[in-house]
Amino acid sequence: MISLNRSSFLSNSGVNGSGVNAQRQRRQPPAFVKVIASRSNQDQKGRATSERSGSVLVDSTLKEMKDHTSSSPIVDPESAVSGGVKDVYGEDSATEDQLVTPWTVSVASGYSLLRDPHHNKGLAFAEKERDAHYLRGLLPPTVVSQDLQVKKMMHNIRQYQVPLQKYMAMMDLQEMNERLFYKLLIENVEELLPVVYTPTVGEACQKYGSIFRRPQGLFISLKEKGRILEVLKNWPERSIQVIVVTDGERILGLGDLGCQGMGIPVGKLSLYTALGGVRPSACLPVTIDVGTNNEKLLNDDFYIGLRQRRATGQEYAELLHEFMSAVKQIYGEKVLIQFEDFANHNAFDLLEKYGTTHLVFNDDIQGTASVVLAGLIAAQKLVGGTLADHKFLFLGAGEAGTGIAELIALEMSKQTGAPLEETRKNIWLVDSKGLIVSSRKESLQHFKKPWAHEHEPIKELVDAVKSIKPTVLIGTSGVGRTFTKEVVEAMAAINQKPIILSLSNPTSQSECTAEEAYAWSQGRAIFASGSPFPPVEYGGKVYVPGQANNAYIFPGLGLGLIMSGAIRVHDDMLLAASETLAAEVTQENYDKGLIYPPFANIRNISAHIAANVAAKAYELGLATRLPQPEDLVKYAESCMYSPAYRNYR
């Protein structure tokens, strides 16, 4: 079913934000929309009559469109224009002070306009707009600015003491006033990032069935097998550029949350827009529901997913393949598909299977690796030397751990010219059975085998630290408090400045806290974590822990892929993103012990990452948007979505 009230039914998508590419000719709305608008404009007094006759036209036109979509894929032929998708509203070619029309299927007005999150401005509607769009009496008489609305919303959100309440307030705002939501998030990113994403999103997923109000994204379950293309057509936007998809089997460090993992794609895509400037209408969150093995959820009256054990094997593979094929058919080959929180046994297989046929990216494997590598490159300014001078020990050998290890090895190979097989020998991994060594090779999963080096078996982490003598300790285990006092003290005994990265999310699963890392190393540790920790005072000095948050990387990476029209993700793009992020760390940041820049400047950081990722796409011959812009940083900035309100005629 196609919703008449859903904004942007006609495809209000694109990378480009307000005021971009003023030389582009302004596109006109489709003919049937203009007919409705002209009837309404010619006979405002007979508005009800006009709307009745217009609705007949809308119904017949929608039927024709539905019939057309059922027989052929919808791929926008103009999706390559100016690095973005087709903008039927003319917003991209208009400057922010120009008037635009809030098109849905007809001109949005009155009560429906106030409930359309894409166009609603609340009390910020001007006097002329209230007259033109039948808002008189539907709003209090006061007219306020968007800045005042931001101030009011932040005041209200700060009244909540419980993080989940803040999360729910933000989600309500997103469903009520999209532009205000993103302006709020952009201008208060350091305060609100932990609210809309980790760690709060973990609790939101655990309780998703209880707090579920209005559906966000597409839920594709085993019930839709054989009909996924049809289901995708139910989504009101046609020009999608980024899809974040999960099957909910390994949500953060919380395990199998099934259908309730939808909070992850929704949260990730809000960051794609706020931090990377990708239009919200170009983003599609998807949850693949194949059941859950979580008995607590299966017995929960409020659970919203399939009440069955997880499908595996051929049934699972066929559903995923149908989804991947349908996405490519309906949205084209340049749509970015980001895999999120799949279990290890599926994550690596999916990335390997579709990496050569689709534009795919696994944030847990590649995004985490890229942001951690950036921190390690930056840390060399504090400890001296190069990556090749270090020895790395991981606790955790899943998709995050092995992904980080491989990218570190690639960067060392790039810097030194040494073969990849040689650089891997500086990296050691510990899993649940102990140190990964060559004598275990036959029983190891395939993604662990490259890290099975010659060494006697070691069971305990602290013994591995004492034997391997690493300079860098990285936790990706998903198990909290595994960097014990004995482990951290062993690292501090070996190194003057031990690098300790406790990366597991959410905060409860972190291998150690910032306070523990600094205290047990006598304030000498260079520390960063996956979830945020507050500043720590130790020995009369204040230490500011860094956060190795994937949000530093994936929004800029995605923007770079989109604006270049890349058709594949290459490892060199990840290295370019890491090196760019590391270069953004200033001396002022180093003086505080930070190896990551503050999030307050994240949109500028994302623009530079996007530019270097796009440059690499052009260099590798993987870009399709030609010719290459002369100044990729300025072009990236011009492509970013602006949440500022538009003036309606």
Image (spheres, grey):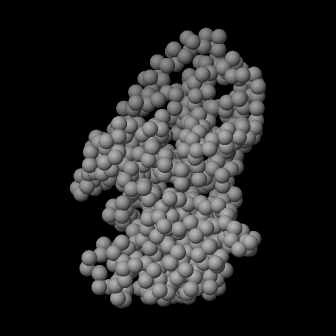
The answer to whether any part of residue 118 appears in the image is no
Q: What is the count of numbered marks?
A: 0
Q: Nearer the viewer, residue 311 or 296?
A: 296
Observer-nearest of 527 and 331? 527
Q: Where in the figure is residue 490, as x and y percent of width and height?
A: 52, 82
The image position of residue 400, as x and y in percent, is 44, 67
Among all residues in the image, which is located at the extreme left? 314
Query: In this image, 474 relative to 439: left or right?
Result: right
Please state the horizontal and vertical placement of residue 103, each as a whole percent of the image: 59, 31
Question: Measuring 52% from the left and 39% from the top, which residue is drawn there?
Answer: 11
In front of the other: 64 or 399 = 399
Quadrant containing the C terminus in the rendered view: top right
Residue under the image location 40 percent in, 30 percent down? 1
Q: Is residue 147 visible?
A: yes
Q: Quadrant of residue 612?
A: bottom right
Q: Residue at x 52, y 28 (%)?
A: 5
Q: Is residue 45 above or below residue 254?
A: above
Question: Residue 19, percent across and down?
Answer: 70, 46
Q: On the rendered structure, is 312 left or right of 191?
A: left
Q: Residue at x 51, y 14 (%)?
A: 52
